[in-house]
Image (tube, coloured by chain):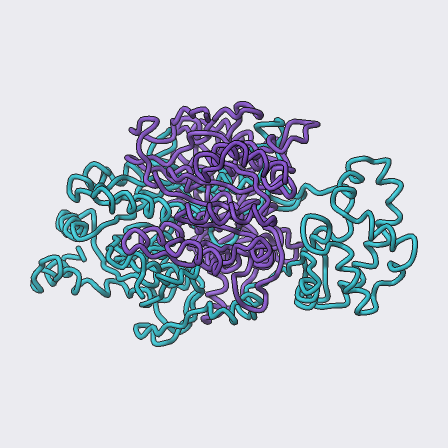
Chain colours: A cyan, B purple
Amino acid sequence: MVGALDDLRVIDASGPIGHYAGRLLADLGADVIKVEPPGSGDTARSYPPFLPDVDAPESSLQFLLLNANKRGVTIDLADERGHDLFLRLLGTADVLIESWRPQEAAELGLTHEQIEAASANIVHASVTGWGLTGPRAQWAYADIVGGAMSGVMTLAGAPDGPPEQLPDLQGYRCASIDTAAGVMAALLHRDASGEGQLVEVSMQEALSMAQETAMQGADILGEDRVRGGALAFRLPGLGLYECADGYVYMMAAGLAGSGFPGLLELMVETDEAGDLTEEPYATFIAESMNRGLLTAAAQDPATLEELMGTLEHIDEIVCAFLLNHPKQYVYQRSQEYRVLVGMVSTPQDISNSPQLAARDWWREIDDPGRGRTLRYPGPPWQLRGTPATLRRPAPLLGEHNEELFLEVGLAAGEIGALARAGVV
Amino acid sequence: MAARSTDAATDGAADGAARPLDGLKVLDLTWFGAGPIGTRALANLGADVIRVETEKRPDGLRIGGPRPLETTSLNLSGYYNNFNSEKRSITIDLTTERGHELGIELVKWADVFVTNMTNRAVSQIGMTWEQVSAANPGIIGMYQPMQGLTGPHSEYLGFGAILSTVCGINGMTGFEGNEPRGSGTNYPDYVVNPIHLAIGVMAAIRHQRRTGEGQLIDMSQLESSVAAMSGPIFAIDNGGGEFRRSGNRVTFAAPHGAYQVQGDDRWLVLGCLTEEHWRAFTALAGHPQWADDERFATLAARKQHEDELDALVGQWAAEQDGPEAMERLQAVGVPAGLVQSASEVLADEHIVERGYFVYPEHAEAGVRAYDGPGFRLSKTPHDLRGPAPLLGEHTFEICTDLLELSVDEIADLVAEQVLF
């Protein structure tokens, strides 16, 4: 079996905002060539944490993660000879991914028009903080700036603390995911017509959908959602709860699954249901502990007032039950009873996940250049006919200069001269 | 017919221009967020996406909001409508024998079948991969349950809020020691899982067009989510040391964070990603001496003294007008922005000039804002050309044109509650 893109070559000249896009295309089978500046290489090569006992610039784990499956060359694009070499390489490619702001592209002589002129029918993907047009096209960007300006960050955090960024550079990640999707759509058109085109992604726009309901709330109701917004009172079985060793999130009411009665069955099994199987609680739980009624109660102070004592008592017993057990236990046992519960995983919990292990999700790959075997996360999907594969480790800086420069027609002597001049 | 948008989102492409997935037929049995937003991207790329729904058990987002006050119509939820633009909606009860037969007819019609229901629900409606591929051997089957088709947790239940905790968002967001609140949203539902879905489907379409072969895609929402935020996991697995939640900090830059400015709960974000950014910031802040202070002279030193650094930046920020500070920082090349509310994003001059939000007219909800495309294509546009469907809006047309039923047959099926 072969990958869906195994006949394609992608030049990835992007910075950290675009790394994951190239990685996704590589996983689908494309021959992805990372182009980095000579010297210290891509910016992300300096991002901690580092692989122990390996020297810079080969040890950044963030760089290794997002650039595995790619080959790598170094070219100084600002140098005329480097520019020519880059265009030669581009001539062998089907796709270019880059992240230059318009001014940077112009300075490099690599605007979309220039790229199209040099390499007809290429799919050219531009991924930046703000897109290529509009009053902020030339502005600087960082992941956190995308999160803030897209309306996503205002939703995260506690009311008495600052708005919070999402983990592991989600602005860059979403921009990259949209870039890969755009490249896929453009490739389908190119397959049919032979025609290339520009794919353009703005991180601010790529993140906007992650505002959830906030945009519609502002548009329809004229109200802005704020971070940490919570009901005046916690409805039993809904929300974040503390366990013996961490937290779980519960949705044990309505919508799906067995709801609160299912949770009660588990508590009965472990003999921790207290008096919840007795009246008046038993009937209340069986007949009224569903999301509709509880939400209505929460919105109507009078009803809530009436129920408050009952709800508080139920919640106390739930809290006591949860504090007696580790989160993994609560998560797995509740799910056995078809109760919607998730445990708040740490990175270590995910690394140890029995489900991910059972599905052979992790990939081990030998990285001889760094002298060890590395454990990588798997792909986002299992494509049974055209599987995603991890075929090579992240490139050492300039590792494939010689093989690729020879391929595009440079003589060995010319490569040596370019290297001595610092162009490659 | 659906109203046309102004199509400001795509440069150089006239409204009505050919799109890359024109002619593609998608049978959409998804609901909530992670599935529908993915099939929406396919629809906005030109595919004919038919969503099968029921009145008996409508998409939870049709019931939810935001919606105009004191309304309950299943057609007025902005949450649903934003995620389903340009799809057609047919209401069939697939749990009836005749309904299932019609469902299978739609499977035979489709190039792509998509569902994000639980494996159990998929079995109950008779749409497992075995059943779908038996009816249409060339079809692509995208199955996107929470934890995949196999494994000990494959029957686990959840929505985005459950998945957010299991995949690590809550455990990695915020400050060490604080309650793990996470993103405040069902984050993986909105970009990560749906657009990964669209990529996987398009990869399979490429293979289908080259070979005529369909395939099964087993997409675990958990795996897809972890794949997109696996930096800390990859690090602990490969000797990078322990993970600690660090709020708005990053390992590779300082100062980096959100700093309160003048006004009511207003926040400026900035990230000094390079030494140039840091020097430019200190000069602009009127404290060029910070750049030479041994506590802050290098990134390593700034990381070591980050509490002191953030306190100083915070003191400076507290005196600033947010928008003005952002403009001044950007003028000297420092990445900076404001924590914007949704209404500010809707009115953001850059967003507006780029025509990101689209305002199609919906028969019941009127003219409302929809998110535009997350990526733009210069020649074959990715754009929104219409609103979300009313529940069952296209039942009659699909039954007559596609399923070739007579009006009498349709009337009987409605009476039997197979169709609504």
Percent x, y for residue B170? 60, 55
Percent x, y for residue B252? 44, 55
**Which image quarter: residue B180?**
bottom right
A39 lies above or below B31: below
In the image, taking residue B289 as reference, residue A315 lies left or right, namely right
Q: Residue at x 87, y 53 (%)?
A: A313
Front-lying residue, B399 or A280 = B399
Q: Is residue B278 visible?
A: no
* Extreme residue in the front direction: B408
Q: Is residue A221 visible?
A: yes
In the image, taking residue A291 as reference, residue B77 lies left or right, namely left
A185 lies above or below B414: below
Quadrant, the C terminus of chain A: bottom left
Quadrant, the N terminus of chain A: bottom left
A275 lies above or below B209: below
Q: Residue at x 34, y 65 (%)?
A: A56
Percent x, y for residue B82? 52, 35
* Extreme residue in the right direction: A279
Percent x, y for residue B270? 48, 42
Count of marks placed on residues: 0
Front-lying residue, B252 or B411 = B411
